[in-house]
Amino acid sequence: DIQMTQSPSSLSASVGDRVTITCRASQSITTYLNWYQQKPGKAPKVLIYAASNLQSGVPSRFSGSGSGTDFTLTISSLQSEDFATYHCQQSYSTPWTFGQGTKVEIK
Amino acid sequence: QVQLQESGPGLVKPSETLSLTCTVSGGSLSSYYWIWIRQPPGKGLEWIGHIYSSGGTNYNPSLKSRVTISLDMSKNQFSLELTSVTAADTAVYYCGRNLQQLVNSYYYFYMDVWGKGTTVTVSS
């Protein structure tokens, strides 16, 4: 199985901050990497697919980059509604696997 | 707009079979992959498996001996069965649609529609 490791596990930030979350795969997954946002008690919601493609309806302050084993999700200016847990997921090979999640909290 | 809704027992006894159904409204099962994901309390997401509208399946090897995902096209539903459950199977179970998107001549998969999730507790 491909292991996905996110860092940090949690972070505290203020509204307006630039936030960066990283995800590392245990082997190359080219650009088969998706990012999801999950709020408490809710299902995840896709933000980014294929490493850098913004899902329709997702604000442009979210962006993704990377290829191979190292990937980044960036929120350019954190908004109050962005406080949530973020998950990366590889769809390069089954079993599809997720990172452990990064919780973004209010400072 | 496609919507998904999970249904099934919230409590299952150890060693018994967990059975969940996902009802799809606002769209058809045809030409899509349909997926089950679970999230144990306080933990990350785990892919259980998926089924294509033609009936082909792919399961997580860690669960493969216990899992069956099936389709009922007439009811626009797909289902999950997990046998011989233990406390480790306690989780929120989500059904979802797995979209196949063409990007730069390659197909990519991601989950674009999710159900709200249903909590299943394994306990006697």
Image (spheres, grey):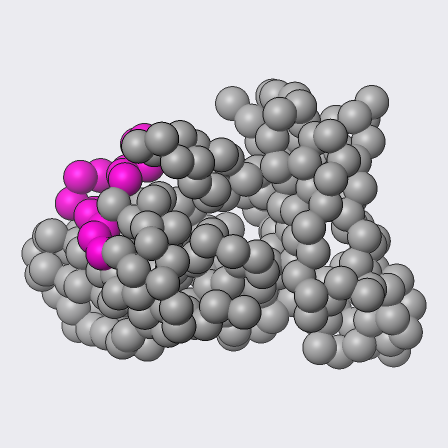
* Residue drawn where x is 52% and y is 73% of the image: B43
Q: Is residue A35 visible?
A: no
Q: How many marks?
A: 0
Residue A75: image location, x then y, percent: 17, 54
* Residue drawn where x is 46% and y is 43% of the image: B110
Q: In the picture provided, is B119 more to the left or to the right than A42?
A: right
Where, by quadrant of the figure, is residue B7 drawn?
top right
Q: In the picture provided, is A10 more to the left or to the right than B76?
A: left
Where, by quadrant of the figure, is residue B104 drawn?
top left
- Of residue A76 and residue A25, the one placed in the foreground of this image is A25
Residue A14: image location, x then y, percent: 13, 65
Q: Is residue B119 above or below residue B31?
A: below
Q: Is residue B93 above or below residue A61?
A: below
Q: Is residue A30 visible?
A: yes
Q: In the picture provided, is A13 more to the left or to the right than A37?
A: left
Residue A10: image location, x then y, percent: 29, 75
Q: Is residue A6 above or below residue B58?
A: below
* Residue drawn where x is 61% and y is 37% of the image: B33
Residue B21: image location, x then y, percent: 77, 43
* Residue drawn where x is 73% and y is 66% of the image: B63
- Of residue B51 and residue B45, the one placed in the foreground of this image is B51
Question: Is residue A16 part of the magenta span, yes or no?
Answer: no
Question: Is residue A61 part of the magenta span, yes or no?
Answer: yes
Q: Which residues are magenta?
A: A53-66
